[in-house]
Image (cartoon, helix red, strand yellow):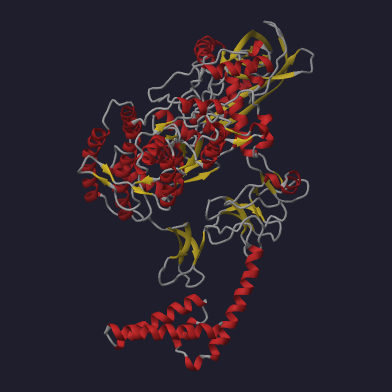
Amino acid sequence: MAKKLVIVESPAKAKTIEKFLGRDFEVRASMGHIIDLPKKGLGVNTRKDFAPKYEIIEKKDKLIDELKAASKRADEVYLAPDPDREGEFIAWSLKYILDLKNPHRAVFNEITKHAVQEAIRKPRQINEDLFNAQQARRVLDRLVGYKISPLLWRRIQSGTSAGRVQSVALRLICDREAEVRAFIPEEYWSIAVTLSKQQQKERFEAQLISRLNDLESLKSAESAADKDEAATPEGSENGAKAGKAAKGRIKISSQAESDAIMQELQGASYRVLKYEEREQRRQPPLPYTTSTLQQDASQRLYFKPKKTMSLAQQLYEGIEIGARGHQGLITYMRTDSTRISEEAQSQVKAYIAEAHGQPYVGQGRVGKSKATTQDAHEAIRPTEAALTPQDVKSYLTPDQFKLYNLIWRRFVASFMTAAIFDTVRADIVAKNYVFRATGSNLKFPGFYAVWSREEDEKLLPAMKVDEPLDYHGLKPEQHFTQPPPRFSEASLIKELEEQGIGRPSTYVPIISTIQDRGYVDQEQRRFVPTWLGETINEVMNKHFPNIVDTGFTADMERKLDDVEDGRRSWIEFLSTFYGDFKTTMDKAEVEMNRVQKPLEETDELCPDCGRNLVIRTGRFGRFISCSDFPECRYRRSVVNKTGALCPQCGGDLVERKTRMKKRLFYGCGNYPTCNFAIWERPVPDLCPKCGGLMVVPKGAQEPVCYQDFLAQHTTEDKPLLDGKAKAARAPRTTRSNATTTDGATSPATKTRRKSVSATTKATDDTAKKTTRRSASTTTKATTKTATRTTAKRTTKTTKTATAKAKASSKTPTRRTTATTKANAASKRETGATQ
């Protein structure tokens, strides 16, 4: 019998920890939360200190009974959910529901033998402040969601919702979309000259940067910019905004201006005005936080944040590593700190010295803590620096390996020395104009020994001041300024973090919610608000300005941090918020008008009645139907044509989505006659070699021949769809059984559906024959019902007979007798049709 009980969240973690602790311990899993606010109703007593009414989560009763029995057998109980606010709430709920007297709280920042045993040796009590902070967040979100959402249902559309943080994220996306729509592109031109050293073949390009008399102003502006760039480490700014053009830089606004400069430069001689060589150091990146990991995994691996966190959870909880056994590979993955423990620093420096040499060992960079940084956990890092990605590759899935490889390399790189470049800059004068050529050469790789570089080296020949150069041509090029980019998942997370909105554990739910609710779509991995999203945002801005205000939301996060640190009472925090919120809510109930989505008219006519067709929005998205609905019920799905043609039948290839996971794929518009379907985006252009279909593979920019793509990719490259096993590349029609949102099926189901249809037709024919044989003894209603399935036939006959019985007599006895007779008749009919 076990003497001590340890309760963790997941079975995978339980399996790992039990091996570390030995026979004296029994490790059980709570399978996440065991209590929560009720699914229906507010569940919060706003008149009595916001007391929450928790309920045991459905289907958790048996698990709770097992945990209670195990806790009674144990001498000591250790509660060890994840080390964050949510984990503290789970620990408190276990203590409350299991009626534990003095449980220990064990905190595992990493799942290694040493860390687990140390946490058991030095447990603590449940942190009431941490629990109260999570409880306050949960109650706050319930108050906002359950008060505003029903109003939106009544005024806009059923199924809509508002949330304290999701509404702010939606506002950021809508505001950015408004900027994009309002943006007016401006024309500008660049001029490049191709040069070489006299009588040498090696050529290089130089860009026109300034007029000669404006050069000093440009140099002053660039000097200040160089200082800022030197302080910026590699990877610290994911998607940073481009700065403004430096003062003194030439601006060419039209073709006329470009032509005038080209005319002036005709016959000009080119000579070196200034040649500068210098050494430039590039600092390594910081270790990953939750936010930067999600951003980098999105940009480098094309992982969605939800997938990234799921894989990180698996790596944290542990993987079976051969003779090492079950072991956690990374530290806790929900953190906003870049701090690294002294022990981990020593380990990684020893590894770098052994693997690369002492010159590559750096001191490690310390990031500046923001006001919103909780710093409760270390940065995300491998539990052992010496456990390289190649050492564990054979034990990991391909996606697990990609993420571990990314985390390991980032951590090791952060403790390596700076990379050193030899940079060259040559200013070249021609008449009154100055051109510039630049080049760089990696002198010492430093952290680039393990971290990939995105830019290529560009070399320049050695030159001297006043050296004449050979001219090989001028090339003017037209450009247009671009609008601010729409948010991607990575850049939205970055913006939320910078604004102080949400915390490491909330980024994924925020992004998932606004997509699941249909408030945004993704086009080329960028968020575009839908009509519903823009309408919700407009209404929230008008009636609940504080809820969608970034400053107000960030201030709420800071106050929750105060609750966690014990500086503020959670009841006081909620009382202060709820007073003003209730007043705003009452006002909105009176002033908010109903919003009706305008119908989108099309140029097509209804094939059934001849009236105009319109585009409507339903539960599963947009569809085309008759404007005379409900008199005419013609409808069909909206299809987005790709411009490419089906290689099997020549039909249009259109966009489709799977019903469950909304995965985008491309299928033939002649479905179900033609069942061709692919994941890769097709393009209108035909292959110049074979004249066949061309597609853009995932993560690529340029199209490739579809047949070449199939030949180069194996079945392991196939994506998963709705949890089904990976299918073979050929044939492409057997991928999934999922039904699409527009009524079609995703690539897999066609062949099987033909056989199902044939079987159904045969069954229906048999049922019709049976019905005709029994027509003399059955009513007209029963005859119609017989063509349907047996279950529906039985149900409808029963209801018909019951209705007749009610009409003939209102007494309970007769109604019961009539129902009994109807049931008997239904059974006889069922037997006849079978």
The C terminus appears in which quarter of the rendering? bottom right
- The residue sitting at the bottom extreme is 776
Above or below, 365 against 94 in this view is above
Left or right of residue 824, residue 307 in this image: right
Between 689 and 146, the one nearer to me in the picture: 146
Q: Position of residue 447 (x, y in %)?
A: 62, 18
State whether residue 261 appears in this view.
yes
Tally the numbered discs: 0
Left or right of residue 491, residue 586 in this image: left
State whether residue 441 appears in this view.
no
Residue at left offset 57%, top offset 50%:
664
Residue at left offset 68%, top offset 43%:
703
Q: Position of residue 255 (x, y in %)?
A: 57, 29
Figure quadrant of residue 50: top left
Between 814 and 27, the one nearer to me in the picture: 27
- The residue sitting at the top extreme is 465
